[in-house]
Image (cartoon, rainbow, N blue to C red):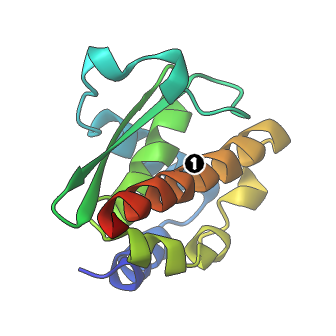
Amino acid sequence: MTIKEIQEEIIDEFSMFEDWMERYEYIIELGKSLPLIDETYKLDENLIKGCQSKVWLHSELKGDIIGFTADSDAILTKGIVALLLRVFSDQTPKAILEADTNFIDEIGLKEHLSPTRANGLVSMVKQIKMYAIAQQSKLAN
């Protein structure tokens, strides 16, 4: 699936919920389904700067696509990172770099987070894009 198709799927899923409490519960459930990150990747260098809670993000190039694994010590943040990985994992660096993140605004996520969590969300997206740049340069060499 393309990034755009996955984002449209997420927008459809979120439109089914009546209110934000249901959406928060759904995000928390997504976090619970996030595959466990290998403990060896829970390093300071994999921590996302700008997040209130601890979020570890690791990327790995598999052929010409990037696979991401992540974890967080906060249940809601873990759900947010699970949502982002659903969109950006198993995509090419080029697709990740060209993708917009309008789906975040369309589902109303940023406006329903505290300012510090919203900043953390932006930091997570930036870090995913930074990994894509790094992995793209490996492909070019």
Tell me if I can see residue 25 in this picture. no
49 versus 131 height, above or below: above
The residue under label 1 is which amino acid type?
Answer: Gln
Residue that carries the numbered disc 1 in the rendered image: 127
Q: Position of residue 86 (x, y in %)?
A: 34, 59
Q: Point out the residue furthest to the left here.
A: 63
Q: Point out the residue furthest to the front here.
A: 141
Tell me if I can see residue 43 in this picture. yes
Horizontally, is 66 left or right of 50 in the view?
Answer: left
5 versus 88 height, above or below: below
Question: Which residue is at a point 58% across and 78% down the rendered structure image?
Answer: 100
- Residue 40 quadrant: top left
Question: Which residue is at a point 62% across and 78% down the rendered structure image?
Answer: 102
Q: Position of residue 85 (x, y in %)?
A: 38, 53
115 versus 8 height, above or below: above
On the rendered image, what quadrant is the C terminus found in? Answer: bottom left
Question: Which residue is at a point 68% across and 72% down the rendered structure image?
Answer: 105
